[in-house]
Image (spheres, grey):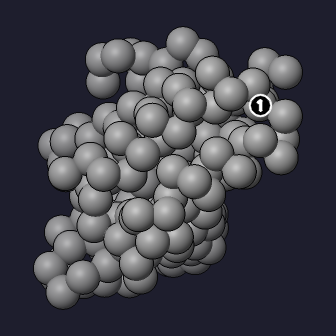
Amino acid sequence: VRFRRGLLVHALLARLPEVPAAERAAVARKFLSLRNVPPGEAEVLVAETLAVLSHPDFAPAFAPGGRAELPILADLPELGAGARVNGRIDRVAVDDAQVWALDFKTNRPPPTRIEDVPRLYLAQMALYRAALARIFPGRRIACALIWTEGPSLMALPEPLLDGETAAIRARLVARLDPAGGRS
């Protein structure tokens, strides 16, 4: 029961972008009804989910042509010999200038400040960003977390992800060469 709401919102965020905008609310209501979500709770979930889908900064990520549950595999030699990312990004969209990468999180309650985001999530998004930069060179990679409680969208600033990438690199170097270059 604890994760049910998050799973429902995750499913809506994954499926609704493929539905014409004018039909999304009706499709979401039907989806929730078939899962025995009470009408009042369903209306809240529909409204909050549609608000995320139409968020002006990330609306392109939910436009037709975006992809849900995109598998990703990329070598990241800039992090060290043999470094590789293998994962699945909840939502990705690409245009000529930019790539949007969104990951859905079910924390309850979700953090309201970037400073309170678990470091594991920042590392995950930094690695996804590095992999996408290799796959789509020359394009800006915009990353955000979508908290399914709410739901709400939290854009992750590029300097924050740059810092996390540097920290990952430092941790890998320290682990692979504990003698600090003297081995």
Q: Quadrant of residue 86?
A: bottom right
Q: Which residue is mark 1?
A: 37
In terms of depth relative to the viewer, which is nearer, 9 or 68?
9
Q: Measuring from the top left, give residue 158's x and y in whole percent.
A: 19, 48
Q: Is residue 18 visible?
A: yes
Identified at 50% across, 58% down, the residue is 24
Query: Observer-nearest residue: 45 or 86?
Result: 45
Where does residue 82 sit, x and y in percent of width and height? 56, 72
Query: Vertical placement of 87 versus 164: above or below?
Result: below
In this rendering, the answer to whether 113 lies above or below 56 is above
Q: Position of residue 159 (x, y in %)?
A: 16, 43
Task: Find residue 122 and report its image quarter.
Answer: top left
- Please tell me how many numbered marks the rendered image carries: 1
**SS label for mark 1:** loop
Does residue 124 appear in the picture of this structure? no
Is 95 left, or right, of 123 in this rendering? left
Residue depicted at x 62% and y 73%: 71
Picture quarter with the N terminus: top right
Q: Identity of the amino acid at label 1?
A: Val
The quadrant in which residue 146 appears is: top left
Residue 139 or residue 105, whichever sits in front: 105
Mark 1 surroundings within 10 Å by alpha-carbon count, few (fewer than 14), some (14 through 19), many (20 or more): some
- Vertical relation: 155 (above or below) 125: above
Residue 171: image x %, image y %?
46, 41
